[in-house]
Image: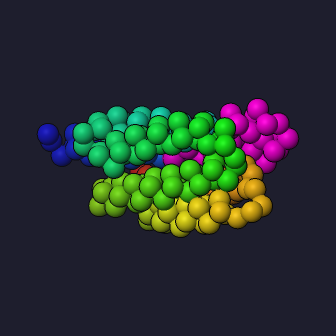
Amino acid sequence: MTNDQTNFAHTSQEQWLARYYFIRTAFSAVWVAAAFSIGQQSLLVGTILLVAYPAWDALANYVDASRSGGLGRNRTQMINVVVSAATTLAVILALTMSMNWVIGVFGLWAILSGLLQLGTAIRRWKSYGAQWAMILSGAQSALAGTFFIIQARMPMPPSIANVAGYAAVGAFYFLVSAVWLTVGRMRRRAS
């Protein structure tokens, strides 16, 4: 592979990551808005949103890993796909029990997926910018998961708003990464 081909492949991957992070931001922003509005008013919509969130994460990780060399080269994302898909099923089951169970499932998922996101960001650190925000996001997710598990044990039942706050912070980190990558690429092009 020539130097030009290597540079083109790197630039193409960096453009993909920026676009991917923008897509993750947009999905989370719409999800958060829906959760804080109709998700709290309608049991059906709230249920759909709670199931859709980890399912979307599984799909997003699968697509990103596929675009970034495949699942075999991106083991943290491959594991994240499995964890998020299993979480989707666990949320469906937990919804038949109580919101405390649902928040407990989200807590465990936030810890695992946060640590896996952290691993993915560390792997990408040397090659792509904006990974510091993804590292912070992964660490914050793991910490939030601990709080979810604590909330799940409280007598007052949690709501979808608990998850929406978590998703809003995640959307912010994806937005920071997307903007950081885009601005960096524009600066390099201008120089």
Q: Residue at x 46, y 39 (%)?
A: 86
Principal SS element in the magenta part?
helix
**Which quarter of the picture shows residue 129?**
bottom left
- Vertical placement of 65 versus 100: above or below? above
Image quarter in which the N terminus is found: top left
Please state the horizontal and vertical placement of residue 153, each as a whole percent of the image: 65, 63
Q: Could you tell me which quadrant the C terminus lies in?
A: bottom left
Left or right: 70 in relation to 3? right
* Left or right position of 30 against 60: right
Q: For residue 127: magenta? A: no
Measured from the top left, where is residue 49 in percent x and y? 68, 38
Where residue 50 sits, quadrant-wise, is top right
Image point (61%, 43%), residue name: 94
Q: Is residue 189 left or right of residue 22?
A: left
- Residue 106 placement (x, y as % from top left): 58, 51
Magenta stretch in the rendered image: 21-50
* Residue depicted at x 48% and y 66%: 139
Residue 70, above or below 116: above
